[in-house]
Image (cartoon, rainbow, N blue to C red):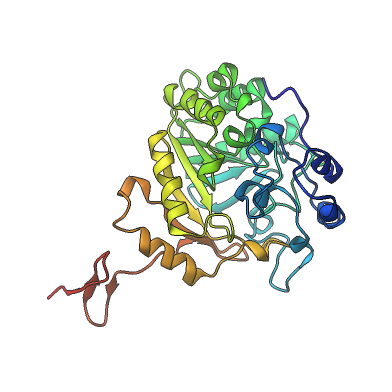
Amino acid sequence: MSQSHPPYRRPADLVEAGLIESAAQAAIEAAAASFPLLLPRALAALIDPADPADPIARQFIPGAEELDIRPEDRADPIGDQTYSPQTGIVHRYPDRVLLTPILTCAAHCRFCFRRTRVGDGAAAMSPPEIEAALAYVAARPEVREVVITGGDPLMLGPRRIAHLLAALGEIAHLDVVRFHTRLPVVDPARIDAGLVAALTPPPGANFSVWLAVQVNHARELSAATDAALARLADAGLPLLAQTVLLKGVNDRAATLEDLFRALVRRRVRPYYLHHPDLAPGTSHFRPTLAEGRALMRSLRGRLSGIALPTYVLDIPGGFGKVPVGPDYWDEDSNTVTDPNGGRHPLT
């Protein structure tokens, strides 16, 4: 069961709770007008109101910086709509599709690349729309993986998740069903025995079920989140982590190292470190690619391979995801640079 107290939705409530100063309320209300505040109590309890650079507050409390809309910002920064042949389906790569059955979340991340689409007013897919999406997948044997995203698909709840997996289980050519979620971090009480059981592949299904959890800072890993991740891992679900590189949150090598080590201890494999997308009003979160590459270079050799994610960029406009980490081989000189900066000829 989820938390008993409702999430914070009004900036005035944050003032009353001592999470922001009253002088900041007007600016926060202006930012929340375009993308509403939604902050679960369990997550708010992790915020240190005395720290002006608190990494959780920066991710979830609206700020005046969001009113700065840059010319390069895009409502659909990674081109979902370009590759959406029908409601709820994004088919960018031949062997996998995204399925977005729900566009609501338990919390609103201020850097969200789908911030123009998600929210309480966003309609979930209707049963006929889901049936049509499943028919789309079933008719394409080249599709081997379905990535269920949103919004947060775990907000569907156990009954609807089990029903969806049962329907996918009828499609013989699927190898993997992957859920992308923030729920174990932002509202871990929802990860109860019923939800974990619902994520089990149905009898006869050919696919495995994977969970990719978004975690951006080690401070997000509360005792309740630890318990939620343990329930998922103990059930045999492979766990991945996706992290967004965010200026002022985790753009230091030591911060990323702490996070990735903490994830591996919890049986969660760091998978991707995403360069932030060009979502409207999020420029204050964006480091440069050069800064991101330097961070990844500094982590090489400090972290085991299982703790080191791939640094990736979704090319603006929908042209796909590519690795953008540092290069170690120089083709012209045929030399390789080691993690300490030494250069070595290969011939």
- The answer to whether residue 289 of the structure is visible from this angle is yes
Q: Quadrant of the N terminus?
A: top right
Number of labels in the image equals 0
**Residue 216: where, in percent of width, then height?**
54, 48
241 or 124: nearer the viewer? 241
- Image height of 227 relative to 96, above or below: above
**Residue 32: where, in percent of width, then height?**
82, 51
Quarter where residue 347 is shown: bottom left
- Image height of 165 relative to 276, above or below: above
**Residue 213: where, in percent of width, then height?**
53, 39
Residue located at (84% from left, 55% from top): 23
Q: Residue furthest front?
A: 50
20 or 172: nearer the viewer? 20
- Image height of 155 relative to 118, above or below: above
Residue located at (45% from left, 40% from top): 240
Q: In this view, does 92 lie to the left or right of 32?
A: left
- The answer to whether residue 139 of the structure is visible from this angle is no
Residue located at (78% from left, 45% from top): 37
